[in-house]
Image: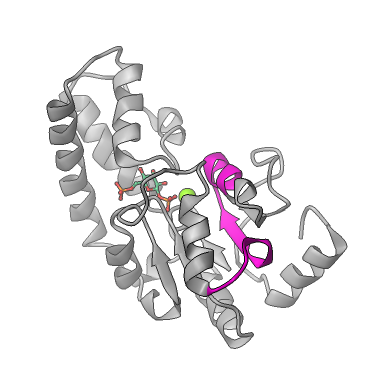
């Protein structure tokens, strides 16, 4: 069982947005919440390149690195203040349930700050493997992050379930031949095998039943 982080276990997107907005403001590039949607599931550098595209600006690699580091400093200042209560509704219960049912649990996230975030949320203990932006060379939609997770869990990809909120992540799961549960609506995530709004009130039995019946929503 593989979990994305941002948008699945916790809503860190709002902190990414605040930090990127400060950088965009400094560079006098217009950037709103709608633009922020394009950054979900995307690496830090690629996120900045999208912002530069919005502003029609070009920068050297050195300058890009400088602003990415600055953004991360701002982002971390928010994350360090984040209470463990920010874990999304039902997540802790679902992970407890999955763990008790004997499922291997891995993280598959683009974020290089994953370990710190799991610590802040007091979720680290649930994970048998953590694959994040520090461990992969290719970003989602490449399946590398999930394939490495499956490998660390000792499972063939066909036996894995991925929980994801981004298009790129769902494409990565499919490219890896995994069953994927989209966190969101079927309209926003047409590629998901199954969609649910979140983990609140969701049990392992419901997921297993949906898997067997090929139902597209819970
Ligand atoms: P960092 P996920 C992704 O996390 C975020 O959705 C994306 O907005 C962010 O740019 C990316 O992590 C990199 O994060 O700057 O912390 O390395 O959805 O893959 O868990
Ligand atoms: Mg995500």
Is 165 covered by the magenta stretch? yes
The colouring scheme, among rainbow, by chain, secondary structure or one colour, is one colour
Q: Is residue 88 visible?
A: no
Q: Residue furthest right?
A: 213
Residue 32 is inside the magenta segment: no
- Quarter of the rendering occupied by the C terminus: bottom right
Q: Quadrant of the N terminus?
A: bottom right
Residue 41 locus on image (x, y percent): 45, 44
Seen from this angle, which residue lies furthest top?
Answer: 56
Rendered residue at 50%/75% (across/down): 92
Residue 46 screen position, x and y as percent: 34, 33
Report x, y in % for residue 157: 62, 61
Q: In the rendered view, does 116 fall on the left or right side of 50?
A: left
Which range is magenta? 154-172
In the rendered image, which quarter is residue 215 located in?
A: bottom right
Is 204 above or below relative to 141?
below
Left/right placement of residue 65 relative to residue 93 reads left
As drawn, 136 above or below 26: below
Where on the picture, by quarter, is residue 159?
A: bottom right
Residue 35 or 133: which is nearer the viewer? 133
Furthest toward the bottom, the residue is 100
- Tell whether 191 sits left or right of 165: right
Image vertical order of residue 96 relative to residue 163, above or below: below
Q: Is residue 62 visible?
A: yes
Q: Position of residue 167 (x, y in %)?
A: 57, 40
Question: Would residue 49 be found to the left or right of residue 140 on screen?
Answer: left
């Amino acid at each position: 069982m593989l979990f994305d982080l941002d948008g699945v276990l916790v809503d860190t997107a709002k902190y990414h947005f605040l930090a990127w907005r400060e950088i965009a403001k400094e560079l006098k590039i217009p950037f709103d919440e709608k633009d922020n949607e394009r950054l979900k599931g995307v690496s830090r550098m690629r996120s900045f390149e999208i912002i530069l595209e919005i502003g029609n600006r070009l920068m050297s690699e050195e300058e890009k690195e400088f602003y990415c580091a600055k953004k991360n400093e701002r982002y971390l200042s928010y994350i360090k203040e984040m209470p463990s209560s920010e874990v999304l509704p039902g997540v802790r219960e679902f992970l407890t349930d999955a763990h008790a049912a004997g499922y291997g649990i891995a993280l598959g996230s683009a974020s290089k700050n994953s370990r710190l975030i799991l610590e802040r949320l007091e979720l680290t203990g649930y994970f048998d493997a953590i694959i994040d932006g520090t461990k992969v060379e290719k970003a989602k939609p490449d399946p590398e992050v999930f394939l490495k997770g499956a490998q660390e869990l000792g499972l063939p990809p066909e036996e894995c379930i991925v929980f994801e909120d981004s298009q790129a992540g769902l494409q990565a799961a499919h490219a890896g031949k995994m069953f994927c549960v989209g966190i969101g609506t079927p309209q926003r995530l047409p590629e998901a095998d199954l969609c649910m709004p979140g983990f609140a009130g969701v049990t392992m039995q419901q997921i297993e039943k949906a898997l067997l019946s090929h139902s597209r929503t819970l």
